[in-house]
Amino acid sequence: MKRTALTGLFLTAALLASPVFAAEDLCGANLQIIKDSLVSSSNLGEDEKMNLEETQKSAMAAHAAGDEKKCIELTSKAITENNKTDSGSGGEGGSK
């Protein structure tokens, strides 16, 4: 009986702690995606590249401060906007 209760407590603690680790991984993964986008930014305009760099700096500062939620929020938004730019190059600006 004690063994089952102990196992249950351990599993519960592991499940409750997993979102914290997932948040850290998502922040780091998103920062890596942004870094990769900046390195291979042949299709980014100068404004988009500057915005992405600013977002990267802000997200890294949030990450360093331990604010994973803000880091994820910033990086996810930047990745989404970058993907829209990549896939919709003919529809929005029309300058090509």
Image: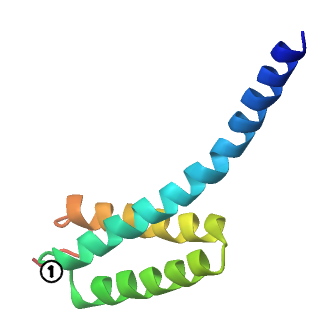
Which residue is tagged 1? 95
Left or right of 12 in this view: 33: left
Left or right of 68 in this view: 7: right
**From this viewpoint, which residue is outermost toward the top?**
1
Residue 60 percent location from the top left of the image: 50, 80
Residue displayed at 56% across by 49% down: 22
Look at the image and tell me in which quarter the C terminus lies. Answer: bottom left
Left or right of 94 in this view: 14: right
Residue 67 percent location from the top left of the image: 67, 72
Q: Place residue 5 in its image quadrant.
A: top right
At label 1, counting other C-alpha atoms closer than 10 Å, the crowd grade (few under 14, some 14-19, many 20 or more) is few
Instruction: Relative to 39, say whether 20 is above or below.
Output: above
Residue 65 percent location from the top left of the image: 65, 80
Instruction: Relative to 65, say whether 25 is above or below.
Output: above
* Amino acid type for the residue under numbered disc 1: Ser
Instruction: Relative to 15, say whether 47 is above or below.
Output: below
Residue displayed at 66% across by 52% down: 20
Residue 76: tell me if it is visible: yes
Give the camera-side residue of 78 and 18.
18
Instruction: Relative to 5, say whether 39 is above or below.
Output: below
Give the camera-side residue of 96 and 65.
65
Look at the image and tell me in which quarter the N terminus lies. Answer: top right
Q: Place residue 8 in its image quadrant.
A: top right
Residue 81 percent location from the top left of the image: 38, 67
Q: Place residue 11 in its image quadrant.
A: top right
Secondary element under disc 1, as helix, strand or loop, is loop
Residue displayed at 41% across by 60% down: 29
